[in-house]
Amino acid sequence: MRKIFLFIAAIIAGISLNAQTNGSLTFSVTTTSTGNYSPRHVVAIWIEKADGTFIKTKLKRANTRVQWLNQWVTKSGQNVVDAITGSTINAHQTENIVWNATDVNAAVVPDGDYKLWIQMAWANTNGPTYSIPFTKGATAVYLNPANQTNFTNMSLVWTPNTTGINENNAVKLFSVYPNPISNQSKINYNLKENSDVTISLIDINGKLIKVLADENQKAGSYSLQINNDLKSGVYFVKMNTGKAQFTERIVVL
């Protein structure tokens, strides 16, 4: 009996170690610097495993001065598959990235501990770096790291595809598209039965921004428009019908 128990435990552990949860990670940061060539600067954001293994670059804004992003160059070999790219930036701004949990070969990476790294430089010298550890898995992650000297207003959110809870299939469809949002976006959903529908927009800290719908709706298809009158960052659209609850993470550029 003990051998059977150990065998089953080993199988469960193996499944856990090899899990590859689909989902997405969003990260936003506002950069700042003083002196030298400021506000002109170069910057890179990338993902690594906790052991330092490079996974994927998500942003590289640098060209002739890329050598000052020395840690990114060493770790990535300057691989920019699926990355936002550009040259030196003339002014500081909020950077937003989205990672779909895949590596440079488009394969979903195993669940486990990872780090998001950012490096910036604004002089002819290697720039400062900062890393944020997070765990990729079936549990959502919401992080707001403390402001650093050169990196402020940071928000990191990992959202597994298991976030939505669908009870009794009262809603057959719930989606926000396009997402990320640069101009306008639409919430689309389909009710199988008459329902008391509440749809709310929530910020990263859980504060209610606005109620988009709060009424009894008949069975059928619906579409609500989201105008980009919001500050850049991560928000959540929450829908509740009494029988079904859904949460969709959105990124406003």
Image: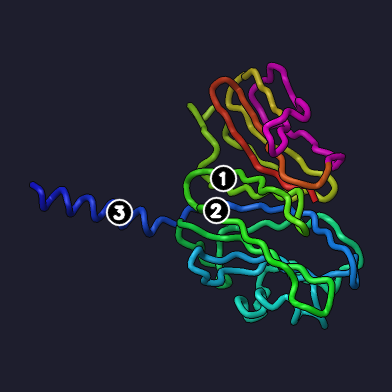
Q: Secondary structure at mark 2?
A: strand
For this orientation, the residue located farthest to the left is 1
Display colour scheme: rainbow
Magenta part, dominant SS: strand
Closer to the chain start, of discs 3 and 1, is 3
Residue at screen point 72% across, 75% down: 69
Residue depicted at x 72% and y 68%: 128
Task: Identify the residue position indicated by label 1 in the image.
Answer: 141
Q: Left or right of 164: which side holds 150?
A: right
The question of residue 102 being in magenta is answered with: no
Across and down, in percent, residue 16 comes to 36, 53
Question: Is 105 rendered above or below residue 143?
Answer: below
Q: Amino acid at mark 1?
A: Val
The answer to whether residue 177 is seen in the rendering is no
Q: CA distance from mark 2 to mark 1?
A: 7 Å
Residue linked to disc 2? 134
Report x, y in % for residue 25. 62, 53
Rendered image: mark on residue 13: 3
In the shown orientation, is residue 36 left or right of residue 215?
A: right
Q: Amino acid at mark 2?
A: Phe
Q: Residue at x 68, y 66 (%)?
A: 129
Left or right: 5 in relation to 85: left
Secondary-structure class at tag 1: strand
Left or right: 192 in relation to 221: left
Q: Which residues are magenta?
A: 201-230
Q: Position of residue 184 (x, y in %)?
A: 83, 44
